[in-house]
Image: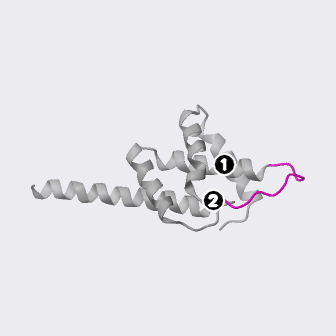
Amino acid sequence: MNRKGEEEIVDEDRGQEEYIRQVLEAYRKTPGTMGTIRRPDRMLAVQLYQRGVSVRVVENALVLAAARRLMRPADAPPLGPIRSLAYFLPVIEEVLGLRVKPDYFQYLRHKLERLAPPR
């Protein structure tokens, strides 16, 4: 293999590592999660990268799910903490199929900032 081919593989690996870092950091900071990252979370992030799911889609899914959990009736029973990135898989699939403006997710982000303390 020539030198250029080796550099392309390294760059692709760097892109994957950055993707994984961004997804796991977004998950860790999401309100309602334990705030810890486990090996299965890292493995799922790799799978999402391999599927070509953008970081933005994952972030939007995290925001949507967190907003749904926080915007519940005051008399609803409390929900336990989210312990796995896999919890968000159905919402990631949902976001992939949504046709909404990015402004909607920005609105939800601002709503979350008011409802949940930052991590």
In the visual, does 19 lie left or right of 109? left
Q: Nearer the viewer, residue 105 or 51?
A: 51
Residue at the image point whose x is 71% and y is 50% from the top = 67
Q: Nearer the viewer, residue 87 or 12?
A: 87
Q: Which mark is residue 30?
A: 2
Q: Position of residue 94 (x, y in %)?
A: 59, 37
Residue count near mark 1 (Cα–Cα under 10 Å), binned few <14, some 14–19, many ≥20: some
Residue 112 at what x, y percent from top left?
A: 71, 54
| Residue 81 shown in magenta | yes
- For the C terminus, give its image quadrant: bottom right
The amino acid marked with disc number 1 is Ala
Residue that appears at 63% across and 59% down: 30
Residue 118 horizontal side relative to residue 78, left or right: left
User: x, y (%) of residue 49?
Assistant: 41, 50
Q: Which residue is mark 1?
A: 65
Q: Are marks 1 and 2 in contact (CB under 8 Å)?
A: yes
CA gap between label 1 and label 2 equals 9 Å
Magenta residues, start to end = 72-83
Quarter of the image with the N terminus in it: bottom left
Element on which disc 2 rests: loop
